[in-house]
Image (cartoon, rainbow, N blue to C red):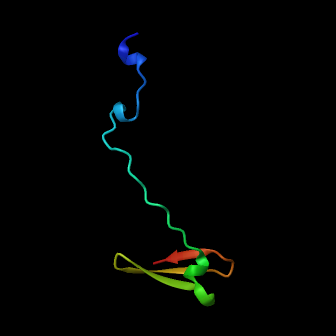
Amino acid sequence: MNDAQDKPTSIASAGSQNPPRATAPRRVLASRELFPGGSHELHIEHNGFIYTLRLTSKGKLILTK
C-alpha cells in the first residue's frame, strides 16, 4: 500500500471547494399568530405578486397566487 491509501480522507481534502455554510435558525410561527381573531385569510406580497394564504374549515392551509 502507498501512503495515499493509508491516510483517511476528510471532506475538506477530498476536493471540496465550498466550505460548509452556516444556516440561520429556523423561524417558526404558530398559525394562530397568522390568523388572529378567527380570521381565515392572509395576503402575502412576494416579488411584486400577492399570494393568499387561507385556512380551510378542516384546518389545512392553501396558498394561491
Q: Residue furthest left?
A: 17
Query: In the depicted view, which residue is nearer to us: 3 or 45?
Result: 3
Is 15 rendered above or below residue 6? below
Is 20 rendered above or below residue 36? above
User: Where residue 8 appears, x then y in whole percent?
Assistant: 43, 24
* Residue 65 visible from this viewpoint: yes
Is 35 rendered above or below residue 63? below
Tell me the quadrant of the picture where the C terminus can be found. Answer: bottom left
Task: Judge from the rendering whether residue 30 lies leftward or rightward of residue 46; answer left or right.
Answer: right
The total of numbered circles placed on residues is 0
Query: In the depicted view, which residue is nearer to us: 65 or 43?
Result: 43
Tell me the quadrant of the picture where the N terminus can be found. Answer: top left
User: Where residue 58 appears, x then y in whole percent?
Assistant: 69, 78
Q: Residue furthest top?
A: 1
Question: Residue 32, located in which quarter of the rendered image?
Answer: bottom right
- Residue shown at 55%/85% (left/top)? 41
- Residue shown at 38%/46% (left/top)? 20
- Residue shown at 40%/17% (left/top)? 5
User: Where residue 49 appears, x then y in whole percent?
Assistant: 38, 79
Question: Residue 23, located in which quarter of the rendered image?
Answer: bottom left
Task: Judge from the rendering whether residue 9 lies leftward or rightward of residue 31; answer left or right.
Answer: left
* Residue 39 visible from this viewpoint: no
User: Where residue 7 appears, x then y in whole percent?
Assistant: 41, 20
Question: Residue 47, located in which quarter of the rendered image?
Answer: bottom left
- Residue shown at 36%/14% (left/top)? 3
